[in-house]
Image (tube, rainbow, N blue to C red):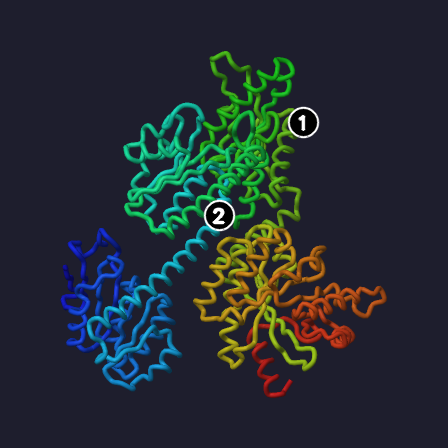
Amino acid sequence: MSGSVRSGDDRMFEFRQEQADDGPPADGVAFTVLSVDDDPAFQQSLRMALSDFRFNDSPLRLLTASSSSEAQEVMVAHPDVSAILLDVVMESDDAGLQLVRAVREQLGNAEVRIVLITGQPGMAPMRKTLQQLDVSDYWLKTDLYRERLQGIVTGSLRTWSEIHALARAKRGLQHIVQMGNRLTGQRDLDGFSRQLLHELATLLEMPADGLVCVREDGNGTPPEGVRVIAADGAFATQQGRWLADVDDAMARDLLAEAFATRASVGMPACQMLYLDGDGRVPPLVAYLASERSLDAEEHELLQVFTAHANASLVNVDLTSRLDRVAYRDSLLDIPNGNALRLELQQVLEQPWPSGQSLLVVDLGQYTDGSLALGPEQGDLLLQRMAERLGQLYPPPCRVARLHEGTFAVLGPTTWLALDPVSALEQSEDTGELPFLRVDAARVDLDHYRGGAGGAVAAGLLLVNRIRADGGHGVADYRAEGEQENLQRFLQSRALYRALREDRIGVALQAQVDMDSGAVVGAEVLARWNENGQPVSPAEFIPVAEASGLIVPLGQRVIELTCDALRALEAAGFPEVPLSVNVSPLQLHRREFIDELAATLEKQGIEPRRMELEITEGAVMNDYQAGRELLARLRRLGFGIAVDDFGTGYSSLRYVHSLPVTRLKLDRHFTSEIGEARGESSVADMILALGRRLGLDVVAEGVETREQANWLREHDCPCAQGYLFARPEPLEDFIARMRRQRTGDG
């Protein structure tokens, strides 16, 4: 037996057989029991009674605490505690019971078994206590002789072991299900292998010390033709090596055995998973240095893990092949036009300025050379041009072939600023190539407004203009003559400055209950004054969306909405919700939900007080991803309103399955109410749909009494528009709410 002392006192003891204090015993894992009691004599008796105790051939690790607060500290420091022997009465009459609640509710530990012990009968009635709290047993100290105490501990540890095993299996299965999605989401074999190693280590709760090998050559005896494609931890330096060159002899031999036998191998020192790829994919073996044997539950989880990983391997291989066909040039093995446009669109969607440019390069004599000298000469021209472009524009620039003899380069504007024509046309004395004639066009993406296809088309048009005019060299994209585009660009610059200088404000437009006429909420609208003059949202919102500034603009409006909610609460209106518009670009940013939640938490705003207004197109463009995103927002507590509902072709088909709370009847349908053309039937249909789906409906753009009466007659619950209130500053809206409360208006 060996003991250790914590913090210079005698309150923590470990009972092991010939083991160091900090490591698990060779014949089993130590079980941890915490004794909480303010009686030193009882603690001493407990230590003696359990000094030779073992459970499942494993020793006992006994921790002690003399108060409820000290016990909570021990639980935080030692989350592996299996059982607690807890005195009911310590610093207060119910200190023990309070600790039970803290362990279950605050620490969230539902696995640890708790046995209440008291020296004062009647302080906590046994039956009532066991019914109300998650407590395993209740004993008087006077009844605890040595054998009974050991029996109590044995029962508690046995129950904990069963609960712990079930919880671990549940966590493992949840991890495997989620792992399948993460593995299938990889686009190539290298990414799959790195993720596979990480997922295996996470499942077994071990460091990712291991490697993954693929058999690239089906001939010969392993390790011939086997290469390391992923390595981490202690094996990180083996990345890219052939298996025969791996430093670790044991790993090398065991991996060769796994490939030869086509079977997974499990040992105390390591675990190896063999994935055969269903015979359609080169087989993989993942090797993880485990340094311990696995138990039966872990072996079962590994079998399930292997089956899921093998299925994901087949899917990733198929995806990789499809990606190669779709996004790689088969002759030059560089990105093709599809890949270039995809990356270009991502750049164009970034907040302005991106600092990126597009260079379109055309090899003038490619077609004539191919016709005159044969396709081999044309291929040679293309290969040499690809080599020269790669040398002239190394990463982070991306070189792609658009079609035939036309290439494109996407990269930092400063890298693409120099004239590339002379360098690309430079002749070599090898005699392999004829004279190269190159023309190019450069598009500064910070001065371009449009999509990826338009940017490529602009570059190609400039190259064609050079040749049509009999010129030669590089042409730069200019927006002269496009007054509207220039105005939008200048306006985006001004909006950018306004955002940086915090000159964006908001106004609130009241939303009114149609039955009572009471203001029940408001929509928050962005406002911008430039040089003392208001800029219409109809002008600057499209500019913000086209330039990517809608993201910081939307974030600023959310922050101002939080300020408004706090002001309403301070004025005595904490239950008045506010609605805020969220653009599709803002909504689909990966960081949006985390940033939104952090903003509200920082300002102390509950999500239920804020409604997010989204356009139906923001969801319908990628229905499944949009639905999952909205579900996450609903789980956080946000209300979700579909703005301008009814203007999209797919709304009625999908709205029933979207996790939304309200529909906003588009002002177009509101304006048609009372006219002879009958469009009010659309408004009636949307109101009926809202009732059927249990969704609130708010009508926008209500400007006449006739429209309001029609909406009221057709049971529209809520509306907003100039008839009730124009957008107004926050202080005016608060004054409106005060008048409503006092009955003055």
Residue 180: which numbered mark, if any?
Answer: 2
Q: Looking at the picture, does residue 270 appear above or below residue 739?
A: above
Question: Is residue 419 something one can see in this rendering?
Answer: yes
Question: What residue is drawn where x is 27% and y is 63%?
Answer: 78
C-alpha gap between disc 2 and disc 1: 55 Å
At label 1, the amino acid type is Ala
Mark 2 crowdedness (10 Å alpha carbons): few <14, some 14-19, many ≥20 = many
Tell me the quadrant of the picture where the C terminus can be found: bottom right
Question: What residue is drawn where x is 51% and y is 47%?
Answer: 353
Q: What is the x, y in percent for residue 369?
A: 61, 17
Dot 2 or dot 1: first in sequence order is 2
Q: Nearer the viewer, residue 203 or 41?
A: 41
| Residue lying at the far top of the rendered structure | 431
Residue 468: which numbered mark, if any?
Answer: 1
Q: Looking at the picture, does residue 81 appear above or below residue 135?
A: above
Q: Nearer the viewer, residue 382 or 553?
A: 382
Q: Nearer the viewer, residue 39 or 547?
A: 39
Determine the secondary structure under disc 1: helix
Question: Is residue 533 something one can see in this rendering?
Answer: no
